[in-house]
Image (cartoon, helix red, strand yellow):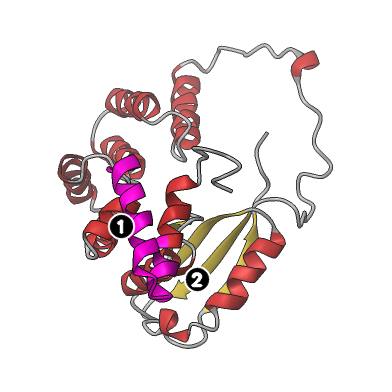
Amino acid sequence: MNQRYARNEYEASSYYQMYRIYLQEKNAAKAEECKNFLINNYPNSDYTQIIKDPNFANAVNAKKSEVEAYYTQTYELYTASNYSQALGNCNEALKKYSKNDYSAKFALVRALCIGKTQPVDSLERALKSVIQKYPSSEVDAPAKAMLDAINKAKNPNVVATVDSSKIKAADPDAYKLKDSTTHYWVVCVPQNRGNVNAFKTKLSNFNNEFYSVKKYQAQTLVLNTTTVVFLKTFTDKNDVLSYNDFILKKTEVFADLQKKIFLYLVLVKKTT
């Protein structure tokens, strides 16, 4: 691949995989060659940092777990109506953790807490800030929907005009199962049925070891008494089934979860 396509997007990850393979084959010369290539051509990549410092990946994963646990705690405070404390957590997180995978979520929860404790104008400003700072993120649509509801409440007599020629017809295939479209791999953990953060750490280590090229992302969603861990994104049904078959053989990944957890696959239709 690298000979045919110079400087392709997978060059760094492929050299890292070759480096690991050569180490396993005890081919020190070839492993050193791959290592030097990464150091010279991708000095700031995660792959180079992992080679230089074997604890780098563990440190990154630990940091992600810390941020996620703090977000889960903050969201639970919000759902328990502890708005002032949840707001303080959000402000602290946005300062302490800088930019991370949960920054947009913290910002939205912060706006919601403001809406519960301050006048509606403050909520409106907070939502506008979320939309401005995190465009096209997962919180963009709900923030816009809430802002639109506020505007409609302020201007109940304003009637929107709709150009019928621009209304798209409903897609009859939108909710049909499609094996060839994007899939998620999902685990649901009922309350008090396991250590979700420990599970996510082992899941991340598993992916780093066997699927580092894929760069799968694990996210968590708390729904009442159930924590949902979903891994994204798989290209199609076969891709996710292959992953599922392999990871289920690695029982150590699930050691921190009690038996009878709910394991299933979720189909996600790509947005065009």
- In the picture of the structure, the residue carrying the numbered disc 2 is 188
Residue at (17, 50) in percent of width and height: 85
For label 2, the crowd category at 10 Å Cα-Cα, with few meaning under 14, some 14 to 19 and many 20 or more, is some
Dot 1 falls on a residue whose secondary structure is helix
- In the picture of the structure, the residue carrying the numbered disc 1 is 68
Segment colored magenta: 19-44
Q: Residue furthest front?
A: 29
Asked whether 152 or 101 is in front, the reply is 101
Residue type at numbered disc 2: Cys
Q: In the figure, 141 relative to 173: above or below?
A: above
Across and down, in percent, residue 48 comes to 30, 52
Across and down, in percent, residue 42 comes to 33, 42
Q: In the figure, 14 relative to 256: above or below?
A: above
Q: Main secondary structure of the magenta part?
A: helix
N-term-proximal mark, 1 vs 2: 1
Q: Is residue 267 left or right of residue 22?
A: right
Q: What is the quadrant of residue 98 in the picture?
A: top left
- Marks 1/2: CA–CA distance: 16 Å
Q: Residue furthest right?
A: 172
Asked whether 111 or 204 is in front, the reply is 204
Residue type at numbered disc 1: Glu
